[in-house]
Image (cartoon, rainbow, N blue to C red):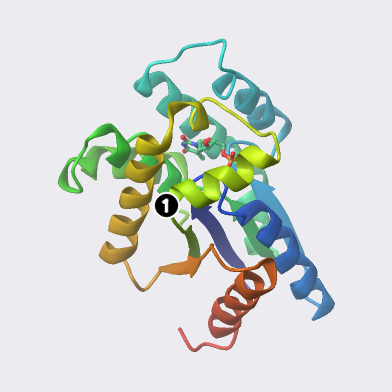
Amino acid sequence: MKGLFITFEGIDGGGKTTQLALAAKWLREQGYEVVESREPGGTPLAERVRELVLDPSLPLTTTTQMLLYLAARSEHVDKLLRPSVEAGKIVLCDRFSDSTLVYQGLSQGKSLEELALLRNLCSFASAGMAPDLTLVFDGRPEVLVRRRAARGVSDRYELQGLDFQQALRKGFLALAEAEPERLQLIDAEGSQEQVAASVQQAISALLHGEK
Ligand code: TMP
C-alpha cells in the first residue's frame, strides 16, 4: 500500500512545527507508521544546507537561496520522502515546494503567472513528488510573530519585519485559492487544542477518502 505525503506550511510563528509533532503522535496512536521531517533538512546533507541558507551572517541572493533549497529538496525526496511513502508510511513534512513558491516567488513581487519557471524548477527538484494534502497555518502576522519572538526564535526572514510576513501570508493565501483541493487553511490563531483538532479533521478526511 502506498503511504501519504502531508506538508505543513505557513508564515513563521504559526505553530506548524508543534502541530506536526502532535499530529504524528495522534497518527501513531492509531497504528500508522509516521515519518516526521522538515525542509530545508531531513537528511544529513540537507541539514548542512539548512545551516548555510539560514545563517544571517551569509547574505545570499534570492536565486542562490532558491537553488540551495532545491538542492536540499532533491536529496530529501530521493533519500527519505519518496522511499517512505513507497513503503506505505505517512510522511509529515514541515515545509516543501509551497514555501519556495511563496518565499522565493510571490513575496519577492512575482505574480502567480510568473511562478511558472519556479514551479517547473520545484517539480524538477522533487522529481514530480507532490503532497497529497497541504495544511496552511494562517493567521495575522502580528499575532503569530509576537508568539514566536516570545520564545526567543529569530532567523533571516523574521528579521525582515511585519510587512514581509504580510506578503508571505498573502502568498500562501493566493496558493490556497488557486489549488483548494490540496491546500487547506488552518486557523493558527486558536489555542493549541483548537488548532490540533482542525489538523486532525483535515487528515482524517484524507485518510477516510472524504477529500
Ligand atoms: P522553518 O523556520 O519553518 O523551519 O523554515 C525555515 C525557513 O526557511 C523559513 O523562514 C522559510 C524558509 N524557506 C524558504 O525560504 N524556502 C523554502 O523552499 C523552504 C523549504 C524554506
As rendered, which of 48 and 83 lies closer to the eye? 48
Residue in view at x 66 percent, y 34 percent: 153
Secondary structure beneath disc 1? loop
Residue 76, horizontal then vertical, whole percent:
61, 41
Residue 130, horizontal then vertical, whole percent:
45, 57
Residue in view at x 22 percent, y 35 percent: 109
Q: Vertically, is 193 above or below 53?
A: below
**Label tally:** 1
Residue 126, horizontal then vertical, whole percent:
47, 45
Q: Quadrant of residue 25?
A: bottom right
As rendered, which of 81 and 26 lies closer to the eye? 26
Label 1, residues with CA under 10 Å away: few <14, some 14-19, many ≥20: few
Q: Vertically, is 144 above or below 184?
A: above
Disc 1 under 8 Å from ligand 1? The reply is no
As rendered, which of 179 and 35 lies closer to the eye? 179
- Under mark 1, the amino acid is Gly
The answer to whether residue 30 is visible is yes
Residue 1, horizontal then vertical, whole percent:
65, 76
As rendered, which of 95 and 75 lies closer to the eye? 95
The answer to whether residue 88 is visible is no
Residue in view at x 24 percent, y 42 percent: 115
Q: Quadrant of residue 27?
A: bottom right
Q: Is residue 136 left or right of residue 116?
A: right
Q: Vertically, is 69 above or below 140?
A: above
Label 1, on which residue?
Answer: 128
Residue in view at x 55 percent, y 57 percent: 8
Q: Quadrant of the C terminus?
A: bottom left
Q: Vertically, is 156 above or below 162?
A: above
Q: Is residue 21 left or right of residue 96?
A: right
Q: Is residue 31 left or right of residue 210?
A: right
